[in-house]
Image: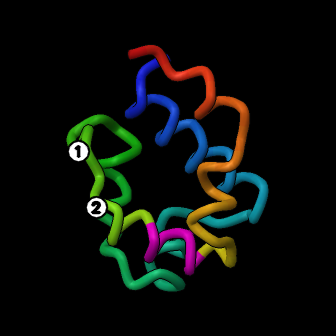
């Protein structure tokens, strides 16, 4: 799996786990809903670290927790 797909899948998983909608996460994180949708639907294949940090803050997790899953260890080069 590539990095973009892994990030997208992780974000989708966290949205489900935390029971957030895209708009709920946008409100909590300060990231516009359009930016979140662009990440989830493939328009933005390289989300910045600042955006990811803001999303993590909105989800109530650290950036380390976001990336500390086995899927990121198995990313193809």
Q: Secondary structure at mark 1?
A: loop
Magenta region includes residue 55: yes
| Vertical comparison of 27 with 19: above or below | below
Horizontal side of 45 relative to 68 (left or right) equals left
Q: Who is closer to the viewer here, 61 or 37?
A: 61
Q: Which mark is residue 35?
A: 2
Tell me how far mark 2 sits from mark 1, CA to CA: 8 Å
| Vertical comparison of 12 with 6: above or below | below
| Vertical comparison of 1 with 73: above or below | above
Magenta segment main secondary structure:
helix
Horizontal side of 45 relative to 37 (left or right) equals left
Q: Residue at x 56, y 70 (%)?
A: 56
Residue 59 location, quadrant:
bottom right
Q: Which residues are magenta?
A: 53-58
Q: Residues within 10 Å of mark 2 (few under 14, many from 20)?
A: some
Q: Residue at x 69, y 49 (%)?
A: 68
Query: In x, y percent, where is residue 40?
Result: 40, 44
Q: Residue at x 56, y 79 (%)?
A: 57
Query: In x, y percent, where is residue 9?
Result: 56, 36
Q: Residues within 10 Å of mark 1 (few under 14, many from 20)?
A: some
Q: Residue furthest left?
A: 43
Q: Residue at x 53, y 84 (%)?
A: 28
Horizontal side of 33 relative to 45 (left or right) equals right
- Asked if disc 2 and disc 1 are in contact, CB closer than 8 Å, the reply is yes
């Amino acid at each position: 799996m590539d990095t973009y797909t892994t990030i997208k899948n992780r974000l989708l998983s966290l949205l489900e786990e935390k029971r957030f909608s895209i708009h709920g996460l946008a409100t909590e994180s300060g990231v516009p809903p359009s930016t979140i949708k662009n990440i989830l639907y493939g328009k933005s294949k390289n989300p910045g670290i600042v955006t990811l940090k803001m999303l993590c803050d909105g989800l109530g997790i650290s950036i380390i927790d976001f990336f500390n899953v086995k899927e990121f260890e198995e990313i193809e080069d």
